[in-house]
Amino acid sequence: MNRLRWALADGATLTRRDLDHWARQPAQVVIGLLFPVMIVLMFGYLLGGGMAVPGGSGAAGYREFLIPGTLALTMVFGLEGTFQAIKTDVSRGVTDRFRSMPMASSAVVVGRSVADLLNAVVSLAALVLCGLAIGWRWHSGLAAALGAFGLLLLLRFAMLWIGIYLGLIVRGEGALVAVQILVWPLGFLSNTFSAPSSMPGWLGAIASWNPLSSTVGAARELFDNPGWGGSSWVEQHAILMAIVWPTLLIAIFWPLSVHRYRNLDR
């Protein structure tokens, strides 16, 4: 019990440390919040008038279709922030200093994960307020909406552990660009903005099985917003797969991150 209390106290200390960084860099936080809001406004008002989505009518229908996808996309892009923070700490020797101190070995990764998850909650709140301001609504009750937000945070939690692992193993000045090259196709090769059925067969299959597509489909279903639907098994079981995909990713990258952290100097 004492070891658990010790680990929790150290994790809370590192969480406060990461949150203090954001408090000292408010401009960076604001820019991070404005980016998804800008995507919503650009896609919603520049393209919304010319887009037709199943179950939606006109620009208002497109904006209801757009918001769940943008919420999920923000959760995936959060991987870059986690990666950059971990990589910076490793390259500056901060992580080595923590590891030499009498603190729980899990504190660094736990602190980062809790802080980034809190950041994700703030990002979701900002986007939801933006969505409500332009007419987005959920239509299936509070419980279903909370379920959708839970699935979105579950996806962010999975991306977070991928970001921690990549931050511990990737080196070099161009590392962030390399990670972006991996993340951006993951974000856009999905059902967020286009129907997989409209893509070439092999590309549509990849988009359908993209974990992001499952979360987007599940969020649209739980919010009762317009969506593409789809006839494949994975598209018909979006809520189930929105749980399975992140759980599988966490099961892979959590132990990999812990193992890498413990062997960081090798």
Image (tube, rainbow, N blue to C red):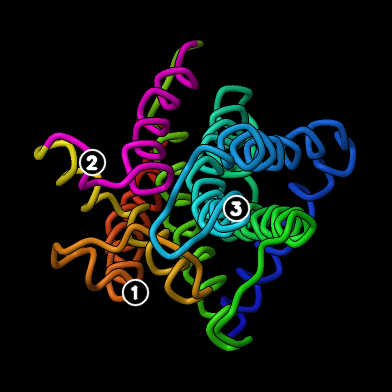
In reply to whether residue 52 is colored magenta, the answer given is no
Q: Which type of secondary structure does the marked residue at label 1 adopt?
A: helix
Q: Amino acid at mark 3?
A: Arg
Q: Position of residue 13 (x, y in %)?
A: 75, 59
Which residues are the magenta region?
174-200
Residue 228: image location, x then y, percent: 34, 57
Name the image quarter holding the N terminus.
bottom right
Give the SS element for disc 2: helix
The amino acid on which the numbered mark 2 sits, given as a three-letter code, is Ser
Q: Tag 3: Cα neighbours inside 10 Å, few (<14), some, or many (≥20)?
A: many
The residue positioned 52% from the left and 80% from the top of the image is 147
Q: Which mark is residue 98?
A: none
In the picture, measured across the screen, residue 208 lies left or right of residue 115, that is left
Whether label 3 touches label 1, CB < 8 Å: no
Query: Residue 153: x, y in percent?
Result: 54, 64
Spatial CA span between label 3 and label 1: 21 Å
State the residue at coordinates (35%, 67%): 242
Q: Please tell me which of labels 3 and 1 falls first in the chain.
A: 3
Residue 166: quarter of image: top left
What residue is shown with label 1? Answer: 239
CA–CA distance in space, label 2 to label 3: 20 Å
Residue 14 seen in this snapshot? no
Q: Which residue is mark 3?
A: 63
| 51 shown above or below 254 | above
Q: Nearer the viewer, mark 3 or mark 1?
A: 3
Write down the residue under mark 2.
198
Q: Nearer the viewer, mark 2 or mark 1?
A: 2
- Whether the residues at callouts 2 and 1 have beta carbons within 8 Å, the answer is no
